[in-house]
Image (cartoon, rainbow, N blue to C red):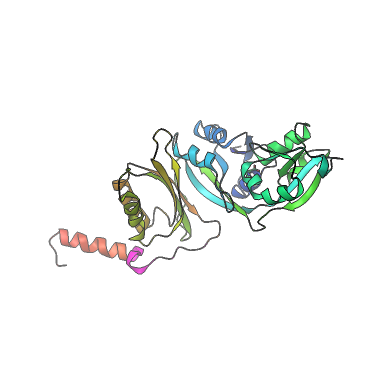
Amino acid sequence: MPHIAYLGPPGTFTEQATRILTEGFDAELLPYESVPQALAALRAGDVLAAGVPVENSVEGSVPATLDALAGGDPLIAVSEATVSVQFDVLVRAGVTADQVRTVASHPHAIAQVRGWLAANLPDADVRMASSTAAAVEQVAAGELDAAVASPLAVELFDGLHVLARGVADNADAVTRFLLLRRPGPLPDPTGADRTSIAAVIAHEPGTLTEMLLELSLRGINLSRIESRPIKDRIGEYRFFLDLDGHVADARVGDALSGLHRRCSEVRFLGSYPKADHSPASVPTPVSEQAFQASARWLARVREGGAS
Ligand SMILES: O=C(O)C(=O)Cc1ccccc1
């Protein structure tokens, strides 16, 4: 049976998302302690795919995921899922709020409950854990007093108790997760797809504008653009872009070819169906038909035919 890696231990939001992403798939989920470790297992061929968190509507992207995708052997995303996240605060049975001296969770979870922590556990020392469920393990082991975790986590440990339920400073917060694989056949285009890339541009005037022009000229909607430093050179950045459309779409393929000509590095990170199934709006001049008609016209002209 194929194995699928995820950011563990059991009880994380990533486990929940990876179950959604692999529904109907006969596979066994394997927890890894960190995103880089899950992706190393995928690159080594130990697992068929890996489920990872990529961005959150409150705290932004998950840097460990972006960095792990930018370096090392290429991987591609084949599907995405969004999960709305609310938290339970877990303690050992009998522990009351005024006894909590330490509280821990994943940095993205802490960021989403800062207001609640300030109001309800103002004196607790806030610590970061590698995941929400890793924090729960530490509470169960008596190393910490409280964990901010998924409502599913309490069921995995005996002797834990919910101090507060449904905690979230922003009730509508969602996190986006990706299922990653080693490069291979791409998911078919659906008309409601997203393409992810990472691109490095020269540190010169106008290069960012030129990169964006490649997209805007082809009527391509950007759903995310953000930069991460290139680790060994100050002032230079790698841009992570999510755009509407599939690399098999003429306008997207044409734009990516343009980026490849302009950028010092372009890494394709996948074309996959959007979780919300919202179709891309395609302006008439960059429709598939318009691209085909213009290609036929150009071929005619090059053969010496009438234009
Ligand atoms: O730690 C987890 O449970 C994760 O899956 C990462 C995470 C943390 C907070 C919100 C969404 C995902």
For this rendering, which residue is in front, 236 or 221? 236
Q: Is residue 192 above or below residue 185?
A: below
Q: Would you say 218 lies left or right of 135 here?
A: left
The residue drawn where x is 44% and y is 36% is 71
Percent position of residue 1, x then y: 61, 37
Q: Which residues are magenta?
A: 278-289
Q: Residue furthest left?
A: 304
Q: Quadrant of the C terminus?
A: bottom left
Whether residue 151 is visible to the viewer of this picture, yes or no, is no
Whether residue 111 is visible to the viewer of this picture, yes or no, is yes
Residue 91, quarter of the rendered image: top right
Q: Residue furthest bottom?
A: 284
The residue drawn where x is 34% and y is 52% is 211
Residue 84, quarter of the rendered image: bottom right
In magenta segment, residue 279: yes
Q: Residue furthest front?
A: 123
Percent position of residue 171, x then y: 67, 58
Q: Quadrant of ligand 1?
A: top right
